[in-house]
Image (cartoon, helix red, strand yellow):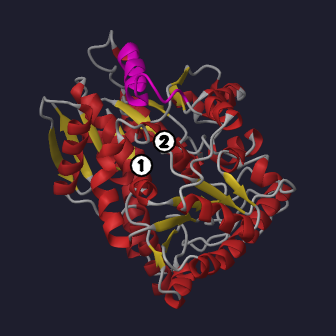
Amino acid sequence: MILPVEIQVRELDAKLLLGCIAAQRGFPVVIGKLKTILGRIASLPRSVFISKGMGAQSVEKFKFIRGLGHEIAGWDEEALVHYPPETHFGKRVAPDAAQYISHLFAWGPESADLWRSNPQFRQSPIHVTGNPRLDLLRREIRPYFEPEAEALRDAHGDFVLVNTNFPLVNSNRGIFLDDGAEGDARTPGIGARGMTREFAEGLHRHKQANFIRFQRMIPELARAFPEIAVVVRPHPSEKPEVYDAIAGRLANVVVENAGNVIPWSLAARATIHNGCTTGVEANLLEVPTLTYGPSREDDFDLGRAFRLPNLISHQCPDFESLQQRLRRILAGELGCADGAERDQLLAEFVAPMDGPLACDRILDVIEEFTRERAELPKPSLPRLFDAWRRIAGMRLEKVRSKISFDRSAAKRAATATARRAVYPEVSAEEMQRRLRRFQTVLGFSEPLDIEPLGPHLYRIRS
């Protein structure tokens, strides 16, 4: 089993949990940085490769992965909180990707229906398993994060966590809406492939307005609650400088996005967000969650894109309502948002949070479709040759990018900083500690071996 990781702070713990359970069930596992895996995949045994997405950039990778004899299954990391179907498929899913995917694992019934609505994916079996990231939120798994949560409480005392989600208008990559927005919309932010001009510009206006609103809200919050810390956690793809400037003026504001968000949410008195997946995660962790600025007049807030995280949070359209609800939370008078509407929405979007773990449901499916095979079939010589040709092309492109001097020093430094934010260093000793903690939480007594295969690359086996 091959478990590639792209955004380390978001994906690594969940995939390490899946790898731990898979190895305990007899699957040797390779886990590590996606780019490192792709560079080494030709030397790995034929495996089941678990993909996290099916965007345009994935198709060429899928071609040589399949060409080497690996099978591809996986999920869509962005399908829990997603754009409307036509935009989601245009932006996140390449038309040619479906032919390479043997099985799809859905977050819940809603994302399974999303896949079924796309004719190109009707041939791929779709399984409502949940996602390993949801397993991390379950009560029986939360002790894994308790050492980090306790350290954060010791470091910051009582604090409120503010999660920002504005890479579209505050990107640390400095790129633009490119070549995909109908009518050639050119607006600062992430790529807009698959979006109409109307949708892209509407989304940009929505994000820009909330970005400004959060910049005003953070210092207001710090002044209104001087007795607690306000911890701002920027999205990994955001530039932190605007938040650093705010923190520089206020003693009780801290900007920090190290590690997984879950221990931060567990340690916080409340989480504040707008349209962010972390709002769903915090609610499932039973942490009081507030969404700031949602408007029923704004279709992006409660309609086409972000309704799940906003509707299962306490909705605070202005600072006065935010302040009132937060005071009640800090006084112990208001807890996590709940009720029939919340339960109905979660049942629609999230696989059951009791019974077998999502990891076990996924592994049940993989065991079923691999049961009769001693090994995956060997690729034909033409497919093998084509795969090696593609790998050689990737390696050549990597060398070219390293020796290229057409980018400015400032841009190269910004790119390096962005990459470190997405995939900070994790030592072999830390990987071993995390694996042992999972084994303890899961009650596994049989020791597992975790072996470094290279930078950011490990093998786990019993």
Picture quadrant where residue 122 is located: top right
Which residue appears farthest toward the top when viewing the image?
372
SS category of the residue bearing label 1: helix
**Direction from residue 89 to residue 353 in the image, left or right:** left
**Direction from residue 296 to residue 283 in the image, left or right:** left
Identify which residue, 40 or 93, lies in the foreground: 93
Which quadrant is home to the N terminus? Answer: top left
Q: Are marks 2 and 1 in contact (CB under 8 Å)?
A: yes
**Direction from residue 332 to residue 319 in the image, left or right:** right
Which residue is label 2 attached to?
Answer: 52
What amino acid is at disc 1?
Glu
Secondary structure character of the magenta stretch overall: helix
Residue 442 pos. (x, y %): 26, 33
> Around disc 1, counting alpha carbons within 10 Å, would you say few (fewer than 14), some (14 to 19), or many (20 or more)?
some
Which residue is label 1 attached to?
Answer: 11
Is 361 included in the stretch rendered in magenta?
A: yes
> Around disc 2, counting alpha carbons within 10 Å, would you say few (fewer than 14), some (14 to 19), or many (20 or more)?
some
Vertical comparison of 250 with 239: above or below: below
Residue positioned 68% across, 48% down in the render: 91
Earlier residue among tags 2 and 1: 1
Identify which residue, 316 or 427, lies in the foreground: 316
Residue 331 pos. (x, y %): 55, 61
Q: CA distance from mark 2 to mark 1?
A: 9 Å
Is 417 included in the stretch rendered in magenta?
A: no
Identify which residue, 192 or 321, lies in the foreground: 321
Vertical comparison of 461 with 295: above or below: above
Residue 259 pos. (x, y %): 37, 60
Residue positioned 37% across, 53% down in the render: 35
Start-end of magenta stretch: 351-369
